[in-house]
Amino acid sequence: MIVGGESGPGARPMDPDWVREIRDQCLSAGVPFFFKQWGGTRKKAAGRLLDGRVWDAMPSAKSQAGVAAAI
């Protein structure tokens, strides 16, 4: 799961609790969670830390192969 806020001039704020809820659901289900950015008009300044850490889990090559085979 990749989660990230909107960026650019019309970007809307993102609720941190919404991001945490998705992260927690992913952790419970064993789904890799990647937090891309908070977003905003100055997305690099906002960063990508969630609760003091970077979340950048990716699916394993084995799980990606299974998805490709199913398509």
Image: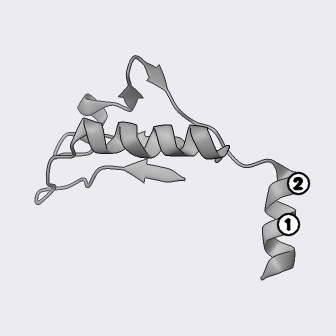
State left or right for residue 56 relative to residue 14: right
The percent coordinates of residue 23 (x first, y second) are 47, 40
Residue on which disc 2 sits: 62
Dot 1 corresponds to which residue?
A: 66
Amino acid under disc 2: Lys
Q: Is mark 2 on a helix, strand or loop?
A: helix
Location of residue 28 (image quadrant): top right
Q: Is mark 1 on a helix, strand or loop?
A: helix
Among all residues in the image, which is located at the extreme bottom?
71
Circle 1 Cα neighbour tier, 10 Å, few/some/many (<14 / 14–19 / ≥20): few
From mark 2 to mark 1, how far is it between C-alphas?
6 Å
Q: Give how far across and how far down residue 49 sits, in percent.
A: 39, 26
Q: Quadrant of residue 10?
A: bottom left
Q: Is residue 35 left or right of residue 32?
A: left
Q: Which residue is drawn at 16% across and 55% down?
A: 11
Q: Can the viewer see residue 70 in this picture?
A: yes
Which residue is most to the front? 28
Residue at the extreme top: 52
Q: In the rendered structure, are the residues bearing label 2 and label 1 in contact, judged by CB atoms less than 8 Å apart?
A: yes
Left/right placement of residue 4 relative to residue 42 reads right
- Residues 59 and 47: in front is 59
Q: Residue at x 35, y 42 (%)?
A: 19
Residue at image coords 79%, 60%: 64
Q: In the image, what residue type sits under mark 1?
A: Gly
Which is more toward the observer, 16 or 7?
A: 16
Q: Is residue 45 above or below residue 15?
A: above
Compared with 29, 66 (above or below) is: below
Q: Quadrant of the C terminus?
A: bottom right
